[in-house]
Image (tube, grey):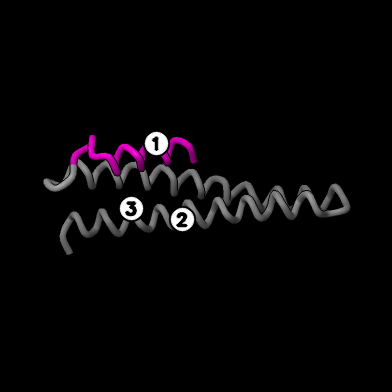
Amino acid sequence: MTRSETLLVLHVASAFTFVSAYTMVTALLVACLRVDTRERALALLRLARPSDALAWVGATGTLVFGLWLVFDSDFYDLFDGWVVGALLLWLVA
């Protein structure tokens, strides 16, 4: 396995981690709005805290490994349209 393939696997795994953890945080926050007691809402919010941290790890890994892929590759440039678009989407997310 080459370094580029390893970076690509880590980039995709980080993106999957980000999306799944962010989905979990969103689902817990929506569920928190539907509970009837404060204790249940706090319990759900306690579950959201590690998912939020995992979303930040995934987002950071996606950015780091994605940029590393761009700088490591001879085929891609930092100012390619899709790379700039991906960076803008990362900032929005």
- Which residue is denoted by mark 3 in the rendering? 11
Which badge, 3 or 1, is on the more N-terminal residue?
A: 3
Residue 6 place in picture, x, y as percent? 24, 58
Q: Residues within 10 Å of mark 1 (few under 14, many from 20)?
A: few
Q: Kindly report the distance in space between the C-alpha atoms of the residues bearing marks 1 and 2.
A: 19 Å
Look at 27% across and 39% down and name the residue there.
81
Residue 72 in the figure: left or right of residue 35? left
Q: Amino acid at mark 1?
A: Leu
The kind of secondary structure the magenta stretch mainly shows is helix
Q: Residue 17: which numbered mark, if any?
A: 2
Look at 14% across and 48% down and name the residue there.
75
Q: Where are the magenta residues, as a range? A: 77-93
Residue 28 place in picture, x, y as percent? 68, 53
Answer above or below: position of 64 versus 13.
Answer: above
Callout 1 touching callout 2 (CB < 8 Å):
no
Look at 48% across and 37% down and name the residue there.
92
Q: Amino acid at mark 3?
A: His
- Which residue is denoted by mark 1 in the rendering? 88
Q: Kindly report the distance in space between the C-alpha atoms of the residues bearing marks 3 and 1.
A: 17 Å
